[in-house]
Image (tube, helix red, strand yellow):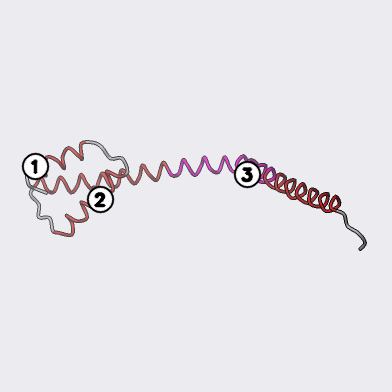
Amino acid sequence: MGNITLEQISMVITFLVGLVTGIGYLHKQTKKWISRTLKDEFEPVSKKIDNLQKRIDDVDMGAVKNHLVTFLSSVEKGDAIDEIERERFWEQYEHYTKIGGNSYVQRKVEQLKNEGKI
């Protein structure tokens, strides 16, 4: 291991920095390529999942709205409502408003609240 010059050390360091930078660039480009490829391959599956999610959301909205309408109808008729039914109603009503419910149900709730029935 004779004499190693400062120039040789600089060349080795420059080579290593270039090598690390090149590997980093290749890694980044490979990740982008894989990501695009996977996105393209799974696009049909993703569309089906989105469609299923919309259908689930529609069923959820319908079920919640049906429960609320039934409860409000019972209140209007003067049926006896126990505390658990009342709590469940408010849970469902909160869920209904969070998922975008905005209709005659809200108007009816406000009306019955103003009348002191709920």
Label 2: how many Cα within 10 Å (few below 14, some 14–19, many 20+): some
Quadrant, the N terminus: bottom right
Choose the circle earlier in sequence order: 3 or 2: 3
Q: Nearer the viewer, residue 42 or 24?
A: 24
Q: Nearer the viewer, mark 3 or mark 2?
A: 3
| The residue stretch that appears in magenta | 29-53
Reply above or below: 12 against 58. below
Residue depth check, mark 1 versus mark 3: number of the one nearer the observer: 3
**How far apart are labels 1 and 2 at the CA level?**
20 Å
On the image, the x and y values in percent for residue 5 come to 87, 54
State yes or no: residue 14 in magenta. Answer: no
Give yes or no for residue 41 being in the magenta stretch: yes
Residue 38 falls left or right of residue 19: left
Secondary structure type for disc 3: helix
Q: Residue at x 71, y 44 (%)?
A: 25
Circle 1 Cα neighbour tier, 10 Å, few/some/many (<14 / 14–19 / ≥20):
few
The residue furthest bottom is 1
Marks 3/2: CA–CA distance: 40 Å
Give yes or no for contact between labels 3 and 2 (Cβ–Cβ under 8 Å). no
* x, y percent for residue 106: 20, 40
Q: Indicate the quadrant where residue 101 lies.
A: top left
Q: Which residue is mark 2?
A: 92
Q: Residue at x 9, y 46 (%)?
A: 77
Mark 1: amino acid: Asn
SS majority, magenta: helix
Which residue is under mark 1? 114
The alpha-carbon separation of the residues under discs 1 and 3 comes to 56 Å
Q: Is residue 22 left or right of residue 71?
A: right
Q: Earlier in the sequence, mark 1 or mark 3?
A: 3
Relative to residue 24, is residue 56 drawn left or right?
Answer: left
Q: Amino acid at mark 3?
A: Ser
Residue on which the image places disc 3: 35
